[in-house]
């Protein structure tokens, strides 16, 4: 199956509207508004062709067609607004954002803090006030709030830009319309003149990611322990979660396991926006029985993520942080982390099928094999886990309805509950201020807390292959001299064994041992050729199933002694 990335070209659209305040006679001020609108799509994907392994069905999105538009309605761009001294002048606009096949966007308004006219009067920033409370000779903008410009709150513009908050992206698309007002309040003695400024409104959208694949697969749900085991340490790629279409970077770390390298972003809303049911099943998730994802919280109070709701599944999506989502223990364990779990590990999670919630041992082994655990300085440990390729984040956590320590500390749930405890579970803590060391530690968080999640691929089933040695003759070696079989263990399709260095000895003395072969053969004459594929003692061979090797004997010209 051939899967192709689409080439997504950058594009830029511009329209313009000046901000102009003009006063031609002492009793009049004229305000005209010009907005420079930039609709920008930024991409960084290549156009290389990718392939799926034969026999693997992929549901991953293989191409995207990102589009974005920014439209300004309302007052005409050449309209002049006349303001009398001591009054307030307004410009009213609507801003419509429409984008699809995107992951995120930013809408930025920028402009000078002051209006200038070449006169001695300077119209400064409004500083978050309604027109009734605005100081004289101030101006500003109002975004998306009150539909009445006369009662809206006006803020000062910034030359470096201010982010305007619109609707969140859902199902990789967004469409909304908001009001954008401008107001300028003049004093009775304001100098007549043309007051103006150039303002820029820009839309930047990040295209929806396309899975690049990992070791022949493109869906998170196609991951198996065997696929991970076949990958090399350091192999990396990206896979799509078919439940909601989110794409996650993954990597095989030094511990030999495949990990997500960004936090889980699964929510009820993201699943439904992708056209799927919010009921998780074993066909797409790490659950034993069906689990209904709870509705996400976008605003929280002190009752949320508190002891009062410790056994109620809760998920919080923050618009003010770059972390994907925060889950309490009941939610992240897909309901398996309830009060009846007082020992061991939760049996399920909201991780994709083929992935699971990391255990305490998983985290511990990761820190050991990467050398992080042996680092002497706490700050060195912390910086190492924050930097690529591990890229853990200090996203903080939620306690009693308050998001705390964002940018200062990081936490990640494990599947393991705290020792004989029905209310706490083990977490990986990064720079946590409540721990003695500010590096990387393990903590015991209340199960009601809201914390981020990462998933690790399921372990491959360990297989054992055995080679049995058939002497193919009566030999004089004892059991201690010549093993009858050797076994090896593997999580892949094959493993290596080393053949014994000591050779069997024929009891009759008329034959010499020539090696081992997978096919039984009769005694070979002194001048005859040894069968092909004969292995010498001490050779290493790869086996992919239980195998019997037969001794190959060559007549040495002597008479039998038996």
Image: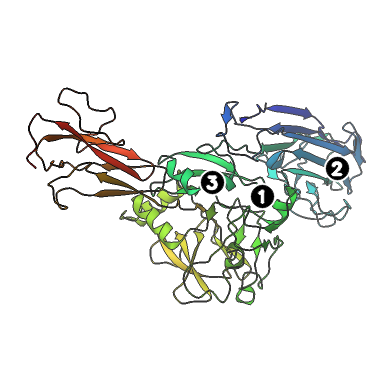
Crowding near the residue tagged with mark 1, few <14, some 14–19, many ≥20 C-alpha atoms within 10 Å: many
Is residue 78 among what the camera can see? yes
**Mark whose residue sits in front, 1 or 3:** 3
Disc 3, disc 2: CB below 8 Å?
no
* Location of residue 556 in the rendering, given as x and y in whole percent from the top left corner: 11, 30
Instruction: Tell which circle, 1 or 3, labels the residue nearer the N-terminal end.
Output: 3
Q: In the rendered view, does 482 fall on the left or right side of 49? A: left
Q: Is residue 285 left or right of residue 445?
A: right
**Which percent across, then down, holds residue 218?**
58, 39
Q: Which residue is mark 1?
A: 243
Q: CA distance from mark 1 to mark 3?
A: 14 Å
Q: State if disc 3 and disc 1 touch (CB < 8 Å).
A: no
Residue to which mark 2 is pinned = 94
99 lies left or right of 539? right
Q: Which residue is mark 3?
A: 223
The quarter holding residue 134 reads bottom right
Task: Report helix, strand or loop for mark 1.
Answer: loop
Q: Residue shown at 57%/26% (left/top)?
A: 48
Asked where in the image residue 252 lies, by quadrant, the reply is: top left
Q: Quadrant of the C terminus?
A: top left
- Residue in front for this viewpoint, 6 or 76: 6
Q: Residue visible at 79% across and 40% down? A: 97
């Amino acid at each position: 199956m051939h899967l192709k990335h689409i080439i997504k070209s950058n594009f830029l659209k511009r329209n313009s509207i000046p901000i102009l305040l003009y006063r031609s006679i002492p009793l009049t001020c004229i305000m005209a508004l010009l907005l420079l609108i930039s609709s920008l799509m930024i991409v960084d994907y290549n156009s290389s062709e990718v392939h799926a392994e034969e026999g693997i069905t992929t549901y991953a999105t293989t191409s995207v067609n990102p589009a974005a538009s920014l439209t300004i309605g309302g007052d005409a761009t050449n309209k002049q607004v006349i303001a009398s001294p001591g009054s307030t002048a307004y410009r009213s606009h609507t801003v419509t954002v429409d984008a699809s096949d995107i992951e995120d966007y930013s809408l930025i308004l920028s402009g000078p803090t002051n209006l200038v006219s070449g006169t001695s009067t300077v119209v400064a920033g409004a500083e978050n006030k309604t027109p009734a409370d605005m100081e004289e000779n101030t101006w500003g903008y109002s975004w998306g709030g009150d539909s009445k410009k006369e009662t809206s709150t006006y803020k000062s513009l910034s030359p470096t830009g201010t982010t305007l908050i619109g609707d969140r992206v859902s199902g990789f698309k967004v469409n909304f319309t908001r009001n954008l007002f401008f107001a300028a309040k003049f004093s009775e003695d304001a100098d007549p003149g043309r007051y103006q400024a150039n303002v820029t409104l820009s839309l930047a959208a990040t295209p929806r990611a396309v899975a690049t694949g990992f070791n022949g697969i493109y869906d998170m749900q196609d991951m198996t322990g065997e696929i991970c085991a076949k990958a090399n340490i350091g192999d990396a790629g990206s896979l799509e979660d078919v439940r909601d279409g989110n794409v996650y970077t993954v990597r095989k770390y030094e511990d030999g396991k495949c990990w997500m390298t960004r936090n889980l972003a699964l929510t009820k809303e993201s699943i439904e926006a992708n056209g799927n049911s919010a009921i998780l099943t074993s066909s797409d998730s790490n659950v034993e029985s069906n689990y209904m994802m709870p509705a996400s919280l976008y605003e929280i109070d002190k009752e949320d993520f508190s002891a009062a709701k410790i056994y109620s599944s809760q998920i919080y999506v923050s618009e003010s942080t770059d972390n994907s989502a925060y889950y309490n223990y009941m939610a992240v364990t897909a309901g398996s982390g309830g009060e009846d779990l007082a020992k061991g590990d939760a049996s399920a999670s909201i991780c994709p099928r083929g992935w699971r919630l990391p255990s305490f041992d998983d985290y511990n082994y990761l820190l050991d094999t990467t050398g992080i655990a042996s680092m002497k300085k706490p700050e060195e440990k912390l910086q190492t886990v924050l930097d690529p390729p591990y890229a853990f984040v200090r996203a903080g956590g939620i306690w009693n309805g308050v998001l705390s320590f964002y940018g200062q500390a990081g936490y990640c749930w494990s599947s393991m509950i705290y020792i004989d405890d029905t209310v706490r579970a083990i977490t990986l803590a990064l720079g946590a201020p409540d721990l003695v060391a500010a590096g990387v530690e393990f903590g015991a968080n209340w199960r009601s807390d809201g914390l981020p999640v990462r998933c690790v691929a399921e372990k491959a089933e360990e297989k054992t292959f055995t080679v049995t040695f058939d002497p193919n003759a009566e030999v004089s070696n004892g059991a201690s001299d010549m093993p009858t079989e050797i076994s090896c263990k593997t999580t892949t399709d094959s493993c290596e064994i080393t053949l014994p260095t000591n050779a069997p000895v024929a009891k009759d003395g008329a034959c010499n041992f020539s090696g081992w072969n997978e096919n039984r053969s009769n005694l070979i004459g002194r001048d005859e050729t040894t069968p092909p594929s004969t292995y010498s003692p001490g050779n290493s061979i790869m086996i992919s199933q239980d195998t019997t090797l037969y001794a190959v004997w060559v007549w040495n010209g002597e008479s039998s002694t038996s």
